[in-house]
Image (cartoon, grey):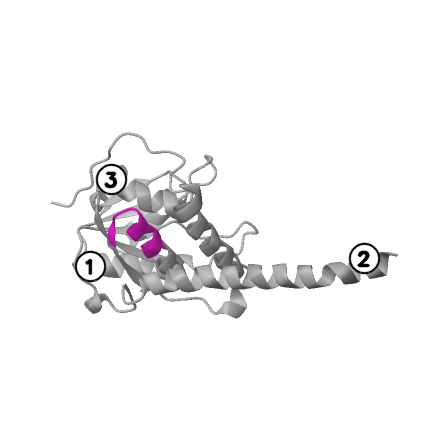
Amino acid sequence: MQRPLLKSWWPGIAVLATVLVVFVFGCEWWIARTAAGRCYDEVKTLSAAPVALVLGTSPRLADGRANLFFLPRMEAAAALFKAGKVRALIVSGDNGTRAYDEPTEMKQVLVSMGVPEPRIVCDYAGFRTLDSVVRAKEVFGQSKIIVVSQRFHNDRAVYLAEAFGIEAQGFNAADVPVALSIKTFLREKLACVKAVLDVNVLGTRPRFLGEEVAVPVE
């Protein structure tokens, strides 16, 4: 009895699986299409903006291994500042507990790379990319930014920025080979789905906003 029942369900399961796969890749394609021509590998191709939004990451993974995305992202942010493309950096990340503080770690490394400390502002409530992007406008008062992260992440951030009325470009940090970070790249596909749903269905807002924070762009 069970085999015939399963056999009768199989076409429906196959159709559902196909729809889900198409939807996942469709979301990724739509985000890449929106960001096309606005994410750059070279500093000289970027238009200047008052502020760069450096998206959060930690130097180490949960298991203690080095995070291969961290240093390239900090190097890209420092290069952008030194080239005079921006006048200040917002380092936005997760500081959900005292033991985990992405913005402070990012700031410390950027200072060691020669970025003046007064030109770095920490956003401690960048729990998600959406939070970081929206807070750049609504808390830090920036309507024109350059986002700094790896290319796949920049595409999504630029998509979110457009959805929330922010003029954004992406500066792509050196990427990590897919073979060395399979989980991150698979997770990004789901993050693209979430971003599309957040913008078009759920109306998601940042977890926290709060009082406005001045950024030293003068």
Residue at 39% x, 47% y: name it: 199
Residue that mark 3 sits on: 140
Image location of residue 145, percent across then percent down: 23, 52
Q: Is residue 66 visible?
A: no
Q: Earlier in the sequence, mark 3 or mark 2?
A: 2
Query: Is 44 on the left-hand or right-hand side of 198?
Result: left
Residue at 57% x, 51% y: name it: 63
Nearer the observer: mark 1 or 2; the answer is 2
From the image, give the main secondary structure of the stretch colored magenta: helix
Q: Is residue 158 magenta?
A: yes
Q: Residues within 10 Å of mark 3 (few under 14, many from 20)?
A: some
Kindly state the secondary structure of the residue where label 2 is placed.
Answer: helix
Nearer the observer: mark 3 or 1; the answer is 3
Image location of residue 19, percent across then percent down: 56, 61
Q: Mark 3 belongs to which amino acid?
A: Phe
Q: Residues within 10 Å of mark 2 (few under 14, many from 20)?
A: few
Image quadrant in which the C terminus is located: top left
Question: What whole-number distance in Å separates the C-alpha atoms at marks 3 and 1?
Answer: 22 Å
For residue 189, which numbered disc appears in the image?
Answer: none
Kindly state the secondary structure of the residue where label 3 is placed.
Answer: loop
| Residue in the foreground of this view, choosing between 114 and 195 | 195
Nearer the observer: mark 3 or 2; the answer is 2
Residue that mark 1 sits on: 82
Q: Are marks 3 and 2 in contact (CB under 8 Å)?
A: no
Image quadrant in which the N terminus is located: bottom right
Q: Earlier in the sequence, mark 1 or mark 2?
A: 2
Question: What whole-number distance in Å separates the C-alpha atoms at marks 1 and 2?
Answer: 66 Å
Kindly state the secondary structure of the residue where label 1 is placed.
Answer: helix
Query: Is 109 on the left-hand or right-hand side of 95?
Result: left
Q: Mark 2 belongs to which amino acid?
A: Leu
In the rendered structure, which segment of residues is drawn in magenta? 157-167
